[in-house]
Amino acid sequence: MPEPSPTSAPASTDSPTLTKAQKKAEGRARQEQQRAAKAAQKQQQQQQSGQGPAGSSSTKPKGSATPRKSGLESNTAASSSKDTEGAGGADGSSDGPKSRGLRIFSHFGLPKTPGHQIKGDIHPVIVRLGLQFSEFKICGANARCIATLTAFKTVIQDYVTPPHNTLSRHLMTHLSPQITHLVNARPMSVTMGNAIRQLKLEISGSDIDLPEQDAKDALCHKIDNYIRDRIIIADEVIEDLAVKKIKDGDVVLTYARSSLVEKILLRAHSLNKRFSVIVIDSRPLLEGKTLLHSLTSTIPPIPCTYALLPALPSLITESDIVLLGAHSLHANGSVYSRAGTAMVAMLAKEHTVPVMLCCETYKFSETVMLDGFGKNELAPTKFSPDAPKSNSNLEILNPLYDSTPASCITAVVTEVGLIPPTSISSIPLALGRMSL
Amino acid sequence: MASDPQSAANQRIVEDLVSRLRRRQLVGSRAAALETLLVLRQVVSKARSSNINQLVNIIRAVGRRLVEAQPKEHSVGNTVRKVLHHIREEYHTASEKPVVESSFSIAKFVLQGQPRKQTTIVRSGSEARAPLKENDPNDPDSFARVLKPVLMEAIQDVFDELETVYDNISKNAKDHIHSDEIILTLGTSKTVDSFLKAAAHYRNYTVIVAETAPSYGGREMAKSLSSAGISTFLVPDSSIYALMSRVNKVILGAHAILANGGMFATSGSLLAATAARSYSTPVVVCAGQFKLTPLWNLYHEHGALDFGDPSAVLGFDEGDLVEKVDVINPYYDYVRPELLDVFITNYGDHPPSSIYRLLKETYDDEDNEL
C-alpha cells in the first residue's frame, strides 16, 4: 500500500503541483494497466499449461485484487494533489513492485516511517515520545512502559475537564487519541497495554466529587505506584531471586540485552560473585553491544565473551546457565521476546543447560501465542544499512520478535518467585487480581 | 616428495599450491579440489616409477603435503584419495587381475543402473593395450609407458566429474522442490545456488535466505537468487525460528560430509537444522561427491574447529570494548546425522545412514590416513 511520505520531493519547486500530480496519476494508471495486462496474460498462460487447481486459485485473487487496488491508488494520487504534499519520488519507485511479496508475510506490515502524521489534539509530550518510539530511541518493554506512563502523567496534569463533563468519564476520551498516536508510531507492547488497562480502571473509578486537581494528583500518584510496584520493586525482587542462582565460577549466557538481566548481572558482580558472561547477539538491533559496554565498565570488569548467534552451538556447551529477558509471557507459557531468544533456549535445552527467564508479572498476557509468526513486528530499514536493496524479487524482512515454546524454559523468575512457565495463568490470581 | 629424485618442476607446483592453501588464498571446496587435481595430473605425468607402489607412494606424499597445508580443507585429501582409488582400479584392469569389486554398489543402485562412466571407458580402452609389465629390468619405462595414458584418462574423468558436479546435483532439483513451497537456506553455497536455480525453471517457489553473520554470505546468495527471478526474502539469522513454522524445507550446503553421515557446514547451519527439527521440517543437504570425507566426528559436539577473523563480529570501531572482551567467530558447525534427512550428491540421493557405504565405494580403506 502506498504511504505518502511527508518528505517533500526535490522537484516540487519548478512545476505546479497540480500538473505534477496529474502526471503522476497518469503514470500510475498506465503502470497499473500494464500490470493488470501482465497479470491477465500470466493467468491465461497458467490456465493453458493446465497447472494444478492450487496454481490457478492462487492467481485468481491476485487478478481480482489488481483493479481494486488501482482505484485505491488513483484515489490517493488525487488526494495528494489536494494535500499539496508531493509523494516522494523514491517512495513511488519502491511502491511499484511491492505487491509481489508473499501474502503470508503481508500481516507484518511495512516498517513505520518515522514522521507519521499527527491527527487531532496530541500533547507535545506524546508527539515527542512517538518519535522516540519510531526511531527506536526508547526501546524495550520496560523502558517503553515507563516512558508512556510518565508522559501520561504530564498529559493528565495538563488536562482540563471541559464544562458539563466529569473527569472520570471524559479523561479517557482525551487519552485515547494519544494512545492511538503512540500505537501508530510503533505497535503497542503488552506491558503498555497492561498498564493502560490499569490506568483506565483507575480513571473510571476516580471519585466524581473530588476537586479536579486532587483527582489528577491522585491519578498521577497511582501511576507512580504502578511504576514503583510492578516494575522497579519487582525488578529488585527478581534480582535477589536470580542472583542466588549464579554461583562462583559459573558461565552465564545471555542473548541481546534485557534491562533486567543486565541489572541481575551487575548485582551479582557487586556481591563479589566470580562469574563470566557470554553475550550472544544478532542483527537487526545488535543490542548486546550495549550490554557489553555496561558489563565491562564495572570495576573490575566482568569477563565477557561476545559472539553472534551462528556461533552459539560452540559456546552453549561451555555455559552453566542461560538468563533471558522477555517482552511478554503468554497464557500457554510461550515467551514473546527478541528474535533469536527461541533458538538460544532451544539449544540450551538440547544441551541441558538451565534456562531462566526473567520477567515481571506485569508482562503477563492472557492471550495465547502459538508461534512467532502470527504476531510480529518489523525493524525499520535503517537497521540494515549494508543489506542489498530490495527489488521486485528480493525483499528484506527484519522481524523483531519470536516466540519460545514453554518446553524450552526451565523456570520463570518473577517477583512472586520462581515458577514453571506453564503455570503463568495462575499468577494474576495469586496476586489477588482477577485481571492483569 | 623427498623420495622422488626427479623434476624440480613437480616440487614447485606442489609448493605453490601448498602456500596458497596455507595463506587461504584458495578457499572453497570445489576450487581446492580442482587445483589439487591439476597438481596431481602434473605429478602423475612427470612421475617416474617402475611399479604401482612407487607411483602410489609419490601421490600419497604429495597428498600428505597438501593436506598438512590446510587440514580443514577436506576436499584436497578427498581428491587425492579418489585419484589413488582410480589409479588402483586402472592398474588392476591393466594387469588383468580381476578386480574384487562387489556386485552391489549403492551409488549404482540409487542411480538406477547407470554404469559409471570411467569404468566403461577403461574397459573398452584397455582391450587393445599391451600387457602391463612391472619391474622389468630390461625396460624400466614400460610400466609408465603402458599405464600413464590410462591414468591420465582416469584423472580426466575425475576432472570432468568435478566440472559437471553442479549440473549433476541440480538435475533432479524439480523432484525436491514443489510449487509454492517456502525454502529456507543460509550462507553462500554454489551448489545450493545452482540447485535452487535449476528448480526455478520448473517451479514457482519462494526462498528465505538467512544472511549468516558475520560473513553475511546470505546477502550475496539472496542477490544471486533474486536476479534469477526467484522470489527471495532476506532475513537476519535471529528470525530463523520465528519463520520456521512456515518453511517447507531447509536446504543447506556442506563443507564436508563425514563418515557417520554428519557434516561440517557454515556456522549457523546447526541452528537452522535444530530449529527445523523442532518443527519437523525436512533438512536437505546439497553437496558434491568430493566432499565425502572418511573422517569421524563423534567426540566434538561443538563444531568450532576453525576460527575466523573476530573483527567481523566486533570491529575496531568499538575501541574500548575490543580490549576487554573475547570475541568468537567460528567458521563451521558440526551437524549431527540425526538432524539431516538426505544428501543430494552427484551420485544420487542418500540418507545419512548410507554415507559410510558410499565412502567405501569411493575410496580405498588404506588411503583413509594419507
Image: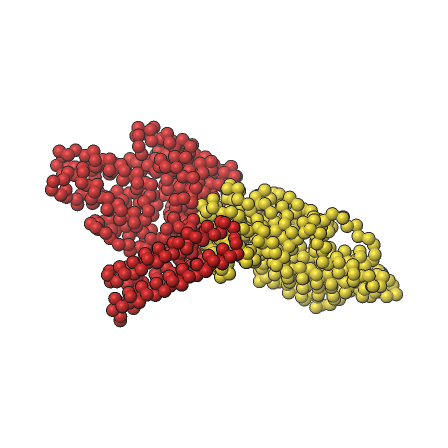
- Asked whether A285 or A236 is in front, the reply is A285
Q: Quadrant of the N terminus of chain A?
A: bottom left
Find residue A69 and report its image quarter.
bottom left
Q: Quadrant of the rendered structure where residue A326 is?
A: top left
Q: Residue B198, percent across and down? A: 56, 57
Q: Is residue B197 left or right of residue B258?
A: left
From this viewpoint, which residue is outermost toward the bottom?
A14
**In the figure, A319 relative to B17: above or below?**
above
What residue occupies the far right of the structure in this picture? B138
The answer to which of A328 and B246 lies nearer the viewer is: B246
Where residue A34 sits in the image (x, y, percent)? 40, 63
Visual hue assigned to chain B: yellow
The correct choice, above or below, for B194 with respect to A197 in the image is: below
The picture places residue B183, in percent across and down from the top left corner, at 51, 50
Chain seen in red: A
- Which of the 4 quarters of the picture holds residue A29? bottom left
Residue at x 37%, y 29% (from the top left corner): A426
Q: Viewed as shown, does residue A15 lie left or right of B164?
A: left
State the colouring used for the structure image: by chain
At a point 55% along the width and 56% down the height, the residue shown is B202
> Eyeballing the image, is A3 above or below A416?
below
Q: Is residue B94 left or right of residue B23?
A: right
Note whether residue A13 is visible.
no
* Residue located at (37% from left, 59% from top): A95
